[in-house]
Image (cartoon, helix red, strand yellow):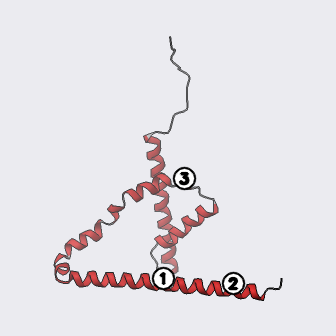
Amino acid sequence: MPTLDTSPRPPTPGLRSNLLRGTVQVLFFVVVWCAAQAVVQWLRWPLPAAVPGLALVLALLAAGVLPEHRLKIGADWLLGEMLLFFIPPLLAVVQFGPLLAHSGLRLLAAIGLGSLLVLAGTGMVVEHTLRWERARHARQEREEPR
């Protein structure tokens, strides 16, 4: 006959534990954003606070100061709920419906052409930079005495 094991065991991480961890992790991102916002305003940088905030989090992750698993639950939740962050722009589209009906194709063409120009320009700069790097490395190899 099997016996029931009544010895105390450490609790397994459950919903309550994950909820608490996720909340703390999301609050971490909010604090980083608030700190970055204060720095951007103090230094009068023409950047959104998310850019230096992202750089800070990336530096902490790359340096190993902040392990990835410490941010996973909060980051996954924020990414999963990203649509909520895009609702205001969607409401603006609804609000300016007549403008889109009148000039929608022109706006779409301008956005599409602008995106293509940015992509082409970026590609050309990357290609030019890679060619320059290869030529520089080839010159260095020729100049180095063996």
Q: Residue at x 32, y 61 (%)?
A: 84
Q: Which residue is tagged 2?
A: 137
Quarter of the figure that contains the C terminus: bottom right
Farthest right residue in view: 146
> Which comes before the other along the chain, label 2 or label 3?
3
Mark 3 → mark 1, Cα distance in angstroms: 36 Å
| SS at badge 2 | helix
Q: Is residue 139 left or right of residue 61?
A: right
Q: Residue at x 51, y 55 (%)?
A: 71
- Residue type at numbered disc 1: Gly
Which dot marks residue 123? 1
Q: Is residue 99 above or below residue 84?
A: below
**Residue 65, image x and y in percent?**
63, 59
Q: Is residue 140 left or right of residue 49?
A: right
Q: Which residue is tagged 3?
A: 70
Q: Is residue 58 above or below residue 139?
A: above
Whether residue 37 can be seen here: no
**Residue 45, image x and y in percent?**
49, 81
Q: Residue at x 46, y 70 (%)?
A: 50
